[in-house]
Image (cartoon, rainbow, N blue to C red):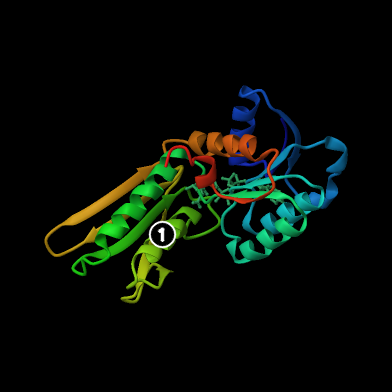
């Protein structure tokens, strides 16, 4: 496959290494305004966007206009998600966003949903989410923590939203910590006066995120429509 990397920072470089090892060719590396590049002449099979929150919308929608399928891992831009999916359908293109591409986190998401379902009637337990990332991360809370909160809210009628660092009774607090070099750790805990139930995922490197993104691009290549990582991993869950 011919792959365009929209964003060539820590994740772009990790994805490049894995894509080349899997026999793909990187035909474009974008680190600035996408309009500076000629997408049409490169015969791109898929673009993978791991850029910055304020660039993601333009990168994605520009790729659609050039009929390039987009896998997006950039977080912190989701206020524009509905606009992007509408445009994807209008342009007859393909789009797959995941707040976290690692297989382990996608298993963790399934555990989180099951645990939330079991805990929804147990009012003695207070739920909270903690995420820890490296100090260069631009957004807080992490996209993964938001996905975890949304999954709990979907299961629990007593929870209507989330807030960073504090929460009302009907909300889930998300605590975001920044510590040098941490690739990404997420913990969901339910605490009562007598015990604590906790599930945790700790990434040891960026390799899992990068491999998942390349697998998603291979999967998306000849498809049309809007997908999630659950579609890619449907045979597992
Ligand atoms: N979904 C997932 O599984 C994962 C998601 N992420 C997310 O991916 C994103 C990138 O993370 P990471 O690689 O660690 O961050 P980095 O800061 O290392 O990389 C971002 C890169 O984007 C570049 N950039 C700036 N403007 C543009 C633009 N207009 N178009 C394209 N690229 C641009 C930056 O260039 P410059 O430095 O010159 O400004 C930088 O090289 C973040 O949003 C992060 O949360 C990260 C890991 C996993
Ligand atoms: O910025 C990061 O590094 C990461 N971002 C993603 C997120 O916001 O959830 C995924 C992963 O945890 C690493």
Q: Is residue 63 left or right of residue 101?
A: right
- Compared to residue 160, the image places residue 78 above or below, namely above
Label 1 residue SS: helix
169 vs 142, nearest the viewer: 169
Q: Which residue is mark 1?
A: 151
For the point 19% across and 56% down, which residue is it? 196
For the point 48% across and 56% down, which residue is it? 142
- Is residue 33 shown to the viewer in this render? no
Quadrant of the drawing holding the N terminus = top right
Quadrant of the drawing holding the C terminus = top left
For the point 61% across and 48% down, which residue is it? 96
Give residue 174's quadrant in the image.
bottom left
Give residue 202's quadrant in the image.
top left
The percent coordinates of residue 47 (x first, y second) are 70, 42
Neighbourhood count class around disc 1 (C-alpha, 10 Å): few under 14, some 14–19, many 20 upward: some
Q: How many marks on residues? A: 1
The percent coordinates of residue 192 (x first, y second) are 17, 63
The percent coordinates of residue 235 (x first, y second) are 47, 37
């Amino acid at each position: 496959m011919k792959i365009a990397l929209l964003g060539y920072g820590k994740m772009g470089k990790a994805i490049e290494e894995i894509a080349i090892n899997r026999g793909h060719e990187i035909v474009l590396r974008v680190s600035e305004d996408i309009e500076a590049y000629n997408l049409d002449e490169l015969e791109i099979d898929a673009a993978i966007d791991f850029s910055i929150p304020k660039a993601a919308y333009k990168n994605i929608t520009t790729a659609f206009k050039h009929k390039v399928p987009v896998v997006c891992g950039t977080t912190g831009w989701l206020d524009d998600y509905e606009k992007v999916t509408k445009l994807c359908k209008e342009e007859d293109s393909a789009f797959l966003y995941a707040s976290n591409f690692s297989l382990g986190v996608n298993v963790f998401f399934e555990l989180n949903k099951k645990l939330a379902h079991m805990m929804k009637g147990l009012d003695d337990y207070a739920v909270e989410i903690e995420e820890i990332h490296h100090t260069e991360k631009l957004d807080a809370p992490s996209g993964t923590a938001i996905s975890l909160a949304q999954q709990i809210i979907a299961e629990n009628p007593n929870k209507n939203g989330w807030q960073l660092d504090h929460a009302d009774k009907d909300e889930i607090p998300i605590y975001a910590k920044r510590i040098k070099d941490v690739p990404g750790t997420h913990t969901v805990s339910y605490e009562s006066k007598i015990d604590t139930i906790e599930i945790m995922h700790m990434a040891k490197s960026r390799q899992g995120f990068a491999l998942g993104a390349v697998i998603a691009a291979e999967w998306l290549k000849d498809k049309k429509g809007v997908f999630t990582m659950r579609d890619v991993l449907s045979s597992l869950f």
